[in-house]
Amino acid sequence: MSVQDDPIANRLPDSLVGYWESDLVKIGATLAAVYLLYLIAGLLLGYGLSGQLNSLRRLTFLIVLYSIGALVVNLHWGYSGLFNIGVVGFMAVGVYTTTILTRPVAGQNPTGTLSGLGLPLPVAIVGGVLAAALVGYIAALPSLRLRDDYFAIVTLAFAEIIRIAVKASELQEFTIFGATIGTGGGRGIRTYPNPINQFFEGTGAPIVDAVSSTIDGPLVSGWTFVLTLTLVLVCVLWLIIRIVESPFGRVLKGIRDDEEATTALGKNTGSLKIRSFMIGCGILGFLGIIWQGSQGYISPGLFVPQLTFFIWIAVIIGGAGSNTGSIIGSILFVGTIYLGPGYVRRLIEKFISLSGQATNFPDALGMLAGGDVSGILLYTLDQTSALRVILTGILLIWLLKRRPDGLFGNRREMASSIDIESRVRDRQSSDATDGGRE
Amino acid sequence: MSDLGGVDTQLLEVESLHKSFGGITALGGVTFEVESGTLTGLIGPNGAGKSTTFNIIGGMLQADSGAIQFGGEDITGESPDYIARKGLVRTFQMSREFQNMTVIENMMIAPTSQRGESAIQSITPGLREDVSEQEEDIFEKAWEMLELFDIDHLALENAGALSGGQRKLLELARALMLEPEMLLLDEPFAGVNPTLEKKLINRIERLRDKGQTFLLVEHDMDMIMDHCEQVIVMHQGDTLLTGTPEEVQSEERVIEAYLGENVE
């Protein structure tokens, strides 16, 4: 490991550097720090146990889902050099396919809801993942001919085409091969029930009752779901590590660095690029299924490009090419830029009494002209989503100037299924003791 | 070696390659043969079409017309990766190492038919053990090659951090990991210091003596004249002549081509 590149390892006492070297400790420490921050914020805001648990649940939920997205972007961009800025499109394909497959068949659906194919959820999930991978295949075909930036445009266009297609009134409800299905158009569509919620409403209800005296009932299923998602994240991480720490991943890295040179070494780069892209898109499809799909209702508005860019920011913070970096980047992104502004607003409102109301920008400016800064402050803090974008911009500029490779971008993650680094070190040290050349 | 006469030992046969870029004719009928087990030099002034010829042989460019035979097989128009897998491997004029990968990874990426290049094999428990087994062999081979080229101490460095000369060494070593029947080297000594250059040419000659075939583009005339058995001279997109270094040196036309005089 290149300790000299790690800003935190440099500041740690020697006895702790060894621990910090472990990726798991890095992730754990970052997560603990963010948790602590939110616990303190919760205390200051006077949250009770349920409030705290709910605050952390939402934080963890987003961190886990962003991490999965970031890992895929890292597989695509960090390892394969595939500039995928259509992330959200593949998520949409996954969740819409699964939804349509699970909706009850026509006649059995409650009035006013859309009908579908009535398949069981597990089958529908497989269908959604395969559909996303298939769309990924179609999107990847031009990558055989296009350079990075042009390919990026293709993926962005794909995502937008998908979003606009599901929005189209023509696809809102239609009959094909005798089955009436639809995307719900701009009005959206009700998704499948979350099996974990179902469990705690049925068989698991006594568990909820047992704890309901201490914490809010919905927290039980909420946290169970978040922990299940964490398990999914672990599986995705395992899968991606297996992929990149292998000869397959090695060729992907070669393609990223210099595709023509990789071809000159006898590698069929087109085929490998497509495979890498499809695997990632399949995972993204699954991400859509467990993210937007778990909220009970989806509409095209959820799948705007902004989500893609947020996931990218997480990867940029962590540093492309490092899986650990992608996860830590997600923790930091969600913890600061994404959820931070809302908490800051609530804290300010609680502790600084702000007089006056400013519901729009001219009002706020007017108050500012009158010497009252609270108006503009309130107005600014109200614009949570705009603040996210502004903070993102500031962070990007800072990163580009100070640490263009992200936190872990220049780290060495060896692409082989065996531990090359220790083998090389053994050889090198034995060479040295043999009085070898060097 | 040219005294072998009629015996068919030609490994690479290039026949009447034509290539134009827009209105400019880059190649106008390049024809030559490279004998198996030789070190053959390809020389010519700038713009003679040497790199274009390399690119076409390697499959990076398609010729407008003409044919290329390698080991008796017609490889005209085949893809670069197919040609490389057939045993005809090229290096580039500007080193094309994988900058953000370590030296050892650069080496290990090269061998063909690696089981682990299938994603399924690499992921699936049970199958991955086979991959790792092969990885051990590939690592051994890569390590030996790094030792041979005296860059084993750099194994864990990022290739992008290497000096120009070290990159040239790495690129040659990496190409040899493919165990190619024939290597096309595009100015392998450009930017390499004389000591290192001597070392490289020694390696190449030793490999040649073991039966490997080399086609070498080089501007250093002394190098070509001292080490090549056969020299192909290109000029203005055409093969001017082929012969031994002595024959080429005494040929008036070659001198004229280099000095920019009109030829015929």
Image (spheres, coloured by chain):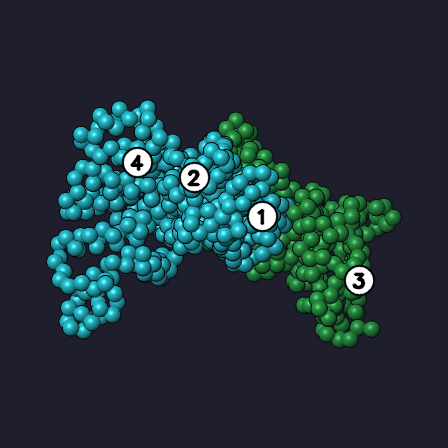
Q: Say what amino acid the circle numbered 2 marks.
A: Thr
Of pointers 2 and 1, the one earlier in the residue sequence? 2
Q: Does mark 1 fall on the same chain as mark 2?
A: yes
Q: Secondary structure beneath disc 4?
A: helix
Q: Say what amino acid the circle numbered 4 marks.
A: Gly
Place of residue A255 in the rendered image (x, y in percent of width and height, measured from the top left): 55, 49
Of pointers 2 and 4, the one earlier in the residue sequence? 2
Does residue A353 sit above or below A436 in this rendering? below
Disc 3 versus disc 2: nearer the observer? 2
Q: Chain of mark 1?
A: A
- The residue under the point 55% across, 53% down is A258
- The residue under the point 47% across, 33% down is A108
Q: Residues within 10 Å of mark 2 (few under 14, many from 20)?
A: few
Instruction: Give the residue pinned by disc 2.
Output: A111
Place of residue B204 in the rendered image (x, y in percent of width and height, measured from the top left): 65, 49
Instruction: Give the residue pinned by disc 4.
Output: A222
Q: Colour of chain B?
A: green
Quadrant where the C terminus of chain B is found in the figure = bottom right
Q: Say what amino acid the circle numbered 3 marks.
A: Gly
Q: Say what amino acid the circle numbered 1 marks.
A: Ile
Instruction: Give the residue pinned by disc 3.
Output: B29
Disc 2 versus disc 4: nearer the observer? 2
Q: Secondary structure beneath disc 2?
A: loop
**Which label sits on residue A138?**
1
**Spatial CA span between label 2 and label 1:** 36 Å
Disc 3 versus disc 1: nearer the observer? 1
Residue A375 is drawn in which quadrant? bottom left
Q: Does mark 4 fall on the same chain as mark 1?
A: yes
Place of residue A104 in the rendered image (x, y in percent of width and height, measured from the top left): 47, 35
- Residue nearest the observer in this picture, A292 or A278: A292
